[in-house]
Image: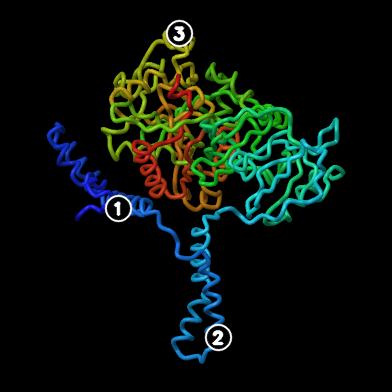
Amino acid sequence: MPALSTGSGNDTGLYELLVALPAQLQPHVDSQEDLTFLWDVFGEKSLHSLVKIHEKLHYYEKQNPVPILQGAAALADDLAEELQNKPLNSEIRELLKLLSKPNVKALLSVHDTVAQKNYDPVLPPMPDDIDDEEDSVKIIRLVKNREPLGATIKKDEQTGAIVVARIMRGGAADRSGLIHVGDELREVNGIPVEDKRPEEIIQILAQSQGAITFKIIPSIKEETPSKEGKMFIKALFDYDPNEDKAIPCKEAGLSFKKGDILQIMSQDDATWWQAKHEGDANPRAGLIPSKHFQERRLALRRPEILVQPLKVSSRKSSGFRRSFRLSRKDKKTNKSMYECKRSDQYDTADVPTYEEVTPYRRQTNEKYRLVVLVGPVGVGLNELKRKLLMSDTQHYGVTVPHTTRPRRSQESDGVEYIFISKHLFETDVQNNKFIEYGEYKNNYYGTSIDSVRSVLAKNKVCLLDVQPHTVKHLRTLEFKPFVIFIKPPSIERLRETRKNAKIISSRDDQGAAKPFTEDDFQEMIKSAQIMESQYGHLFDKTIVNDDLAVAFNELKTTFDKLETDTHWVPVSWLHS
């Protein structure tokens, strides 16, 4: 296809250059792969179309075209009026119908606007009663559409004046650049506001449409311009500004759910940050409680959590051990319990608010992320883990626990357990080498950090089942854990789906499986609620195990996405 002329005779068109570029670059390209890439890029039809449009516009710009008339809409109205006085035949009726269509009227109106090069909104005339002595007063007009103005006001406690408290980033006031924090508001649409409460003024603004006129005394303090925020946070709690009595303006608040990613636009206010949802096309920010403010009021509101000691258990299902904890049945028979020595100092201090995050995607040469599975006893976590392992034994792996009990004749060291002495186990405990550990019948059992590293070093996905309070110790740059909470369905569904199922609640390869009881179901539901309430902010994914096959498919899909998709992870994992 010939290139469009740019109107300068001998000049080579941009489109023509684009078409010829791959052939000209061919001698300088080393590989066929790079050459194919160049042909694909420069041969893209959409790119060709854009260049053609560019050249066409450039050509007409050089011609400097002048519109034949600037009042096409008025001319159409005159024509319609004249035709009304003529004898109406079918052609005149069709033309009148065409000229009366809203889309044709709009098209002619746009033509006139462009022809007159008048793109500003129509504003009402300036008021005549401006006091000449008030040389510091600014009269500002903003055209208000359906969006809020994006500014909050407050009454100055010392002077009683109504002042602008904050400007919301990306809002109408911010985009105008005419209103600033600290400006004193005197009038809105000619209505004095000195004797009004902020709520009354907000009501006036909410009811105003079109252009709004402000009479303002500018603030003496100069604002330092700040750039759009590049800080992203993950919300660790639900927030509804309509239920927050402390927020200065409910309409300016931004609601969010636990797990939402927010972009912080301003932290100028120590109490109320400005943020928007990540990826939201709307540039306007909303108010959210700052991290410090939210931590402070949650800490005052939330009773201190008593940390339950980590209890020993070797629950088994289909040959895979559960983490080391006791069931309700076993608590009566075991008095000597141990807990992870690194856990208790954190739990009572944790107040989940926000966590700074950054996008992360696993590279092909990186180790897999550690996958941590959490769930109450009997929820079917082991069955899901077994199905995953059986689906691809080369891709998934589990840790081998340590124990101090004697090895049995049918066991092999490093297969069922890693057998070590009591002295060595206690030394490793002192050196914080265990993720979890406990004691049962004078023998220690535990999962070591090195056992996790061993699985990951084999280029496998390590499936680790631990108590939820242990998760925080694994959230490191080394492991980058993805935490999945396996949640039970309703108790009615448990009664229905687990009617013929059995649970192995005995110890260390001994004893028989027993059917689920009503107490087992009640305990499972209660345990899940406690886990979700206290540690839900650490969970990346929740899967309800209502149907084992459905839950497994959801788990498998989650694993596949984990290895290929981009996820938000704590900043500390990538910048330690």
Kindly report the distance in space between the C-alpha atoms of the residues bearing marks 2 and 1: 44 Å
Residue that mark 1 sits on: 52
Q: Residue at x 53, y 29 (%)?
A: 356
Kindly report the distance in space between the C-alpha atoms of the residues bearing marks 3 and 2: 103 Å
Residue that mark 2 sits on: 84
Judged left or right of residue 431, residue 139 is right
Residue 115 x, y percent position in the rendering:
49, 59
Mark 3 neighbour density, 10 Å: few (under 14) some (14–19) many (20 or more): few
For marks 3 and 1, the one nearer the N-term is: 1
State the mark number for residue 427: 3
The image shows residue 127, relative to residue 337, as above or below, that is: below
Is residue 48 among what the camera can see?
yes
Judged left or right of residue 261, residue 423 is left
Q: As shown in the figure, which amino acid type bears the numbered disc 3?
A: Thr
Residue 235 x, y percent position in the rendering:
56, 36
Depth-wise, is mark 3 or mark 1 nearer the camera?
Answer: 1
- Badge 3 vs badge 1, beta-carbon distance below 8 Å: no
Depth-wise, is mark 3 or mark 2 nearer the camera?
Answer: 2
Classify the position of the N terminus by image quarter: bottom left
